Image (spheres, rainbow, N blue to C red):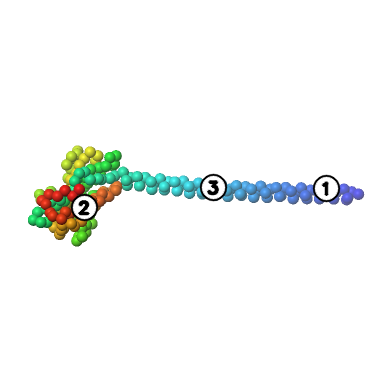
Amino acid sequence: MVAMRKTPYRLNDVGRRKKGLTGLETAIVLIAFVVVAAAFAFAVLNMGFFTTQKSSEVMQAGLEETLSSVEIAGSVVARSSGGQISNITIYVKSAVGKNPVDMRNGVLVISYRDPYNFIPNIYTMNDTNVPVTGVRVRQLTGDGDTALEYTEVWEIVIGISQLQSLKPNDQFSIEIKPAQGSILKVERRLPPVFDPVMDLT
């Protein structure tokens, strides 16, 4: 009788121990899930912040690229002498609300192309000769520094020897490339007959 009474208590003790272990294991598994989920969430958030930062940098770089811009101020004038083109003059200014453009030699790049020639950079020195035998970049109105700023007008005179190979109806292209900002492309076609001074607007 005594043995019969003790057996149920022992069986109950074993069942209670099993239930306790099962609860502990479940808690450990849940904690592991929470830790893994937290680590995954941190990785996702970190990647999101990184992507947002890179997107912001790309947008900022694109904005800076468009903020500095040069545009034509008036006519493009070509002069001829003895039936050959002697020089081409372009007047430029800064667009409204744009950043200043550095016009120094070695910073500004001017490319020239026609049906017979291509020169990646003709602005290798600032020519002060008259007549111009290279490239002359100078400020016509402004504060006297080397930056093209709003309300200023600059003159670019191109007098390279390659212009002499141009013939009537030929087309030439001049690209003005600031160190930062959009490129100004000036593309014109010469008239059928050369005059001493020609407005190519």
Residues at marks 2 and 3, CA–CA distance in whole angstroms = 59 Å
Q: Are marks 2 and 1 in contact (CB under 8 Å)?
A: no
Q: Which one is earlier in the sequence, the residue at label 3 or at label 1?
A: 1
Task: Determine whether, in the image, residue 12 is placed left or right of residue 197.
Answer: right
Of badges 2 and 1, nearer the viewer stands 2
Amino acid identity at mark 1: Tyr
Q: Are marks 3 and 1 in contact (CB under 8 Å)?
A: no
Extreme-bottom residue of the structure? 116
Amino acid identity at mark 3: Ala
Residues at marks 2 and 1, CA–CA distance in whole angstroms = 106 Å
Q: Secondary structure at mark 2?
A: strand
Residue at the spot of label 2: 188
Residue 96 percent location from the top left of the image: 28, 40
Camera sees residue 89? no
Q: Residue at x 18, y 50 (%)?
A: 200
Residue 5 percent location from the top left of the image: 87, 48
Extreme-left residue of the structure? 82
Give the class, few, some or many, for how many residues have Cα within 10 Å of label 3's Cα (few <14, many ≥20). Answer: few
Q: Which one is earlier in the sequence, the residue at label 2 or at label 1?
A: 1
Residue 167 percent location from the top left of the image: 15, 58
Of badges 3 and 1, nearer the viewer stands 3
Residues at marks 3 and 1, CA–CA distance in whole angstroms = 48 Å
Q: Residue at x 11, y 56 (%)?
A: 84
Q: Which mark is residue 9?
A: 1
Residue 188 or 110: which is nearer the viewer? 188
Camera sees residue 187? yes
Q: Secondary structure at mark 3?
A: helix
Q: Residue at x 27, y 42 (%)?
A: 95
Q: Residue at x 20, y 42 (%)?
A: 153
Q: Which mark is residue 41?
A: 3
